[in-house]
Image (spheres, rainbow, N blue to C red):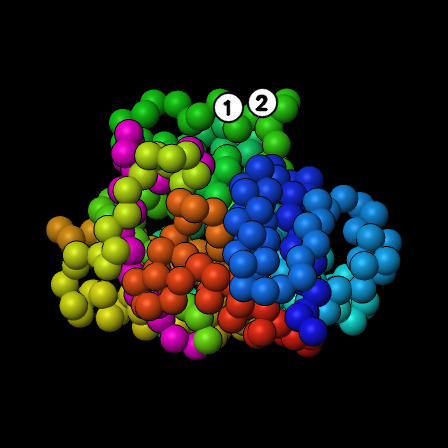
Amino acid sequence: MSKHVAVLMGGWSVEREVSLNSGAGCAAALEQAGFRVTRVDVQRDVAAVLDKLRPDVAFNGLHGRFGEDGTIQGLLEIMGIPYTHSGVLASALAIRKDKAKMVVAAAGVPVAHGVNVSRFEAAKRHVLQPPYVLKPIDEGSSVGVVIVKKGREHPPQEIARPDWPCGDMLLAENFIAGRELTCAVMDGKSLGVTEIRAATGEFYDYDAKYAKGGSFHICPAQILPNIYQRIEECALTAHQAIGCRGVSRSDFRYDDETDTLVWLEVNTQPGMTETSLVPELAAHAGMNFSELVTWMVEDASLNR
């Protein structure tokens, strides 16, 4: 008898739409692979819903707060439902960009200089010398990221608006020029490195990530072999240092002119839409989408 898989998606974070798209694609691929699938649009009654369903596995297709910060993982541990991706500790650590940087830097991976600051303070004065980046301390999908360009006289004011959806604490980091690169890790091995270029601008923002035609990917990345290998090594080190399980994806910047490589963050719940990077890297490594999600279900467990 085939496993019953509950695909968790949606939720109520600012990344809800991305999660719905990821979940829909994964659910369809799992059905194609022969699993019995129930799609669960996660709301605050998710414990009652799962208690009624009693699936064999929960496929975590959630993004953002509550879905990739250790919260849903803790609930699944309590309920005894095996689940995909990283566990409670790794999820909680990875979503806090400042804390994750400390751990990964201690493991020998190069990171950008940064400081924590409230959004109100960052709206009053330049907290770093421009150019620099302001990003919410615990959001993904480039939601709320602002680049403060060189020569800008005043700090950005949009971060102080009353309807700001991304929390009060920001991470300010020195802006690293150059290429945007990403590397997926699966089962303790690299799936390869992709370069991402935004189609309309210099920053791989939310629209570039998820809109059709918003970006184009060069897979594998056309960079020097030693840099390619270094990125793979750093991604694997970050995966292990944070304690990730299943599939993770680390993002980097590399400046050819100064030969500067910087790790930005690790994604414990990387996007799984038709434009997403992990499915593309898996295909490059010889694994189609259905095989990828099947592996993730078979890898699911408790105590992750």
As rendered, which of 22 and 195 lies closer to the eye? 22
* Number of the label disc, if any, that sits on residue 161: 2
Q: What range of the chain is rendered magenta?
A: 188-207
Report whether 54 appears left or right of 89.
right
Above or below residue 123? Residue 247 is below
Residue for badge 1: 158
- Residues at circles 1 and 2 in contact by the CB criterion of under 8 Å: yes
Seen at 28% across and 47% down, the residue is 217
Report whether 211 appears left or right of 285.
right
* Number of the label disc, if any, that sits on residue 113: none
As rendered, which of 264 and 156 lies closer to the eye? 264
Percent coordinates x, y for residue 4 in the rendering: 70, 65
Magenta stretch contains residue 197? yes
Residue 127: name its quadrant: top left
Kindly report the distance in space between the C-alpha atoms of the residues bearing marks 1 and 2: 5 Å
Seen at 38% across and 35% down, the residue is 212
Count up the numbered dots.
2
Q: Which element type, helix, strand or loop, lies under badge 1?
A: helix
Question: Which quarter of the image is occupied by the N terminus?
Answer: bottom right
Q: Which element type, helix, strand or loop, lies under badge 2?
A: loop
Residue 152: name its quadrant: top left
As rendered, which of 143 and 293 lies closer to the eye? 293
Kindly identify the amino acid type of the residue bearing the numbered disc 1: Glu
Seen at 50% across and 23% down, the residue is 158
Inspect this view and state whether residue 52 appears: yes
Percent coordinates x, y for residue 109 in the rendering: 36, 68
Percent coordinates x, y for residue 16 in the rendering: 61, 39
Seen at 57% across and 47% down, the residue is 24
